[in-house]
Image (cartoon, helix red, strand yellow):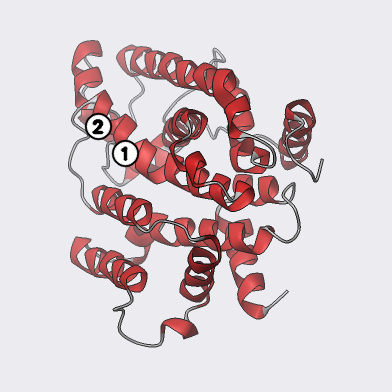
């Protein structure tokens, strides 16, 4: 393992534990490329946390666009994630457009604008979560057709919606709202209550509906997952954790603004192992 590979692997282990654990089920020769992809995804996901306001964040995202287009300033080779990502793109002939779409979607993170509609939220989830799954499927299968796989699309949305609901307490503290305005209006949720940490029956009802929507995406993922083909299983494994997270949110004592929704690592590992065995798609199983 090179220093660059080790850096990306450590970054994913620290910032994206679910995908880190899932990647351990991939063939050893594909893991460095998967870690490079996921390290890039983790880097751009935390841009807001590293900047004081939106403008420096936009500059960081633009730098990544320039990296993809070959026009970045500075020594790109000295940035381990950028170097590993470019090598992965070249090795597997990955299209650059999905990366640009992901970066464009991440601009939303930098501001405190409301998410207008459920369709907008699902679109955001698709660009930020389905895209890494689709690209990972391409790395594992070597087949560009998998970039448009229905399983990756629905799976990424299910995983992202679950993650956003789990992150609601954190987002509320910084006055950022990912719950779509059209759903908030239907259920009578006042965003100011959320920002002040007040859990209301209206908020619980809104989130219960969003969990039903998430489970619908999960069901569609499970129905179409066989279309991924031999070897693509590790790209989709994080979706196997969605049901467990949702089950914890369905508990009567769940407080969406104060409850940490976690699954112990040993149970996550067991769930991923079981999903890998059941799918019988991963050569490493």
Q: Residues within 10 Å of mark 2 (few under 14, many from 20)?
A: few
> Viewer-proximal residue, 41 or 115?
41
Report the residue at 48% width, 34% height from top.
149
Note whether 98 is above or below 1 in the view shown: above
Image quarter in which the N terminus is found: bottom right
> Viewer-proximal residue, 206 or 210?
210
Note whether 159 is above or below 173 in the view shown: above
Query: What is the secondary structure assignment of the residue under circle 2?
Result: helix
So how many labels did they put on this image?
2
> Viewer-proximal residue, 85 or 110?
85
Relative image position of residue 52 (x, y in whole percent): 26, 66
**Residue 235 numbered mark, or none:** none
Relative image position of residue 280 (x, y in whole percent): 77, 31
Note whether 40 is above or below 128 in the view shown: below
In the rendered image, which quarter is residue 247 located in?
top right
Relative image position of residue 132 (x, y in whole percent): 48, 48
Relative image position of residue 29 (x, y in whole percent): 73, 61
In the rendered image, which quarter is residue 58 located in?
bottom left
Image quarter in which the C terminus is found: top right
Query: What is the secondary structure assignment of the residue under circle 1?
Result: helix
Q: Tell me if residue 38 can be seen.
A: yes
Report the residue at 59% width, 51% height from top.
142
Q: Residues within 10 Å of mark 1 (few under 14, many from 20)?
A: many
**Residue 120 numbered mark, or none:** 2
Report the residue at 51% width, 43% height from top.
133
Where does label 1 land, which residue?
124
- CB of mark 1 within 8 Å of CB of mark 2? yes
Q: Is residue 236 left or right of residue 46?
A: right
Report the residue at 17% width, 42% height from top.
113
Q: Is residue 151 left or right of residue 17?
A: left
Q: CA distance from mark 1 to mark 2?
A: 6 Å
């Amino acid at each position: 393992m090179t220093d660059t590979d080790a850096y990306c692997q450590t970054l994913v282990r620290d910032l994206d534990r679910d995908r880190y654990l899932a990647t351990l089920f991939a063939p050893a020769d594909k893991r460095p490329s998967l870690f490079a992809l996921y390290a890039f995804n983790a880097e751009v996901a935390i841009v807001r946390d590293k900047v004081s306001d939106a403008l420096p964040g936009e500059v960081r995202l633009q730098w990544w666009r320039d990296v993809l287009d070959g026009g970045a300033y500075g020594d790109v080779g000295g940035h381990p994630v950028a170097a590993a990502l470019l090598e992965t793109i070249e090795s597997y002939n990955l299209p650059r457009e999905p990366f640009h779409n992901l970066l464009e979607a991440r601009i939303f993170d930098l501001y405190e604008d409301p998410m207008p509609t459920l369709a907008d939220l699902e679109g955001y989830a698709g660009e930020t979560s389905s895209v890494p799954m689709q690209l990972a499927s391409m790395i594992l299968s070597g087949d560009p057709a998998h970039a448009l796989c229905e399983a990756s699309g629905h799976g990424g949305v299910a995983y992202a919606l679950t993650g956003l609901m789990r992150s609601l307490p954190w987002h509320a503290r910084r006055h950022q709202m990912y719950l779509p305005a059209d759903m908030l209006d239907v259920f009578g949720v006042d965003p100011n209550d959320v920002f002040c940490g007040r859990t209301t029956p209206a908020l619980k009802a809104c989130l219960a509906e969003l969990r039903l929507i998430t489970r619908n995406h999960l069901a569609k993922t499970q129905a179409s997952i066989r279309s991924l083909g031999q070897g693509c299983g590790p790209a989709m494994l994080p979706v196997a954790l969605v049901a467990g997270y949702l089950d914890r949110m369905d508990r009567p004592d769940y407080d969406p603004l104060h409850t940490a929704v976690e699954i112990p690592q040993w149970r996550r590992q067991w769930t991923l192992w079981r999903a890998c065995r059941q799918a019988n798609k991963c050569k490493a199983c």
